[in-house]
Image: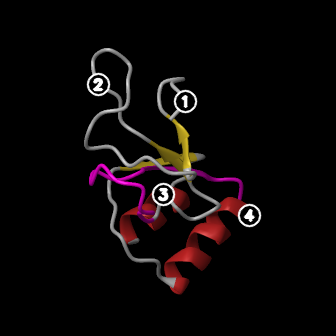
Amino acid sequence: MESIEACALSGANIITLSIEGPYEDPIEREYYEQLYQANILVIAAAGNFGNSGNHYPAAYPTVMSVGAVDRNGYRADFSQCNAQVELARGILF
């Protein structure tokens, strides 16, 4: 979160993250809510376990969740597949 804060303080409007984990944290959730309220778009990887479980921070409602696709534009086997995934190169999950 220190790195994210440094980006925000430097004036970033968009922050992308390739971090993820299966546990929700109320403090982290509030932090991403504050970034959202400050008009900072946070985009995060949906997860790499290939199941339908939510992974964070991508699963927070104020973070855009991005899934992975293979070279043919289809969902990569390892990519999360859930209602939180908002973008995956235009391919619907």
Secondary element at tag 1: loop
N-terminal of the two: label 4 or label 3?
Answer: 4
**Left or right of 51 on screen, residue 89:** right
Q: Mark 3 points at which residue?
A: 58
**How far across and down, in percent of the image, does residue 86 sit?**
57, 42
Residue at point 65% right, 69% down? Answer: 33
Residue at point 46% right, 56% down? Answer: 7
N-terminal of the two: label 2 or label 3?
Answer: 3
Q: Give me the disc on residue 70.
A: 2
Q: Which amino acid does label 2 sit on?
A: Asp
N-terminal of the two: label 1 or label 4?
Answer: 4
Q: Name the residue under label 1.
A: 92
**How far across and down, in percent of the image, does residue 80 sit?**
38, 49
**How far across and down, in percent of the image, does residue 61 sit?**
64, 62
Query: What is the quadrant of residue 92 in the picture?
Result: top right
* 50 falls in the magenta region: yes
Magenta stretch, main secondary structure, is: loop
Q: Which amino acid does label 4 sit on?
A: Gln
Q: Which amino acid does label 1 sit on?
A: Leu
Secondary element at tag 4: helix
Residue contact between numbered discs 1 and 4, judged by CB atoms under 8 Å: no
N-terminal of the two: label 1 or label 3?
Answer: 3
Q: Mark 4 points at which residue?
A: 37
Secondary element at tag 2: loop
The stretch in magenta equals 38-56
Q: Residue furthest top?
A: 72
